[in-house]
Image (cartoon, helix red, strand yellow):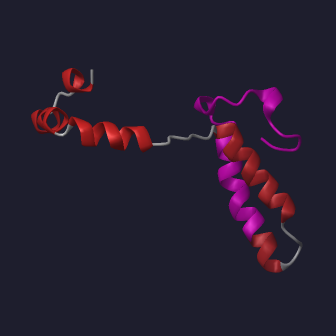
Amino acid sequence: MLISSAKNTAVRRLLSEQSDAVRSCLDRLNVSCVTWAQLADHLAAYQNALGNGAGDRTLKRLIRGPEQEIRAHPRAGIQKHDRMPGRV
């Protein structure tokens, strides 16, 4: 299936000639992902764990910007009811 779906001739040749090596590599491959909501929640939790020192307050402000942008972005897939209280 991989060989027939490859559009690049060099890739198609590699898949054909080195199929065992490619299969071995793919068998060991572990793919993970994180949702935008999970990322935003992680950023919020990190902010909440920070203290009140000058450096921590600065870091909170720096992290809050991307977190709010993620939550507000319509293509992030975060529904309004999933947004944390007090957040955008």
Of residue 21 and residue 72, the one placed in the foreground of this image is: 21
Question: 53 left or right of 7?
Answer: right
Tell me the quarter of the image containing the N terminus. Answer: top left
Q: Quadrant of residue 56?
A: bottom right
Residue lying at 89% horizontally and 40% vertically, measured from the top left: 85
Q: Position of residue 78 (x, y in %)?
A: 70, 31
Give the magenta part as a residue range. Answer: 59-88
Residue lying at 67% horizontally and 46% vertically, measured from the top left: 39
Please tell me whether residue 41 is drawn above or below residue 54 in the rendered image. above
Q: Is residue 61 magenta?
A: yes
Residue lying at 63% horizontally and 37% vertically, measured from the top left: 35
Q: Position of residue 25 (x, y in %)?
A: 35, 44
Q: Position of residue 47 (x, y in %)?
A: 80, 60
Q: Quadrant of residue 10?
A: top left
Q: Is residue 60 magenta?
A: yes
Tell me the quarter of the image containing the C terminus. Answer: top right
Residue lying at 61% horizontally and 41% vertically, measured from the top left: 34
- Predominant secondary structure in magenta? helix
Question: 53 left or right of 37?
Answer: right
Q: Farthest residue to the bottom: give it.
A: 54
The tally of labels here is 0
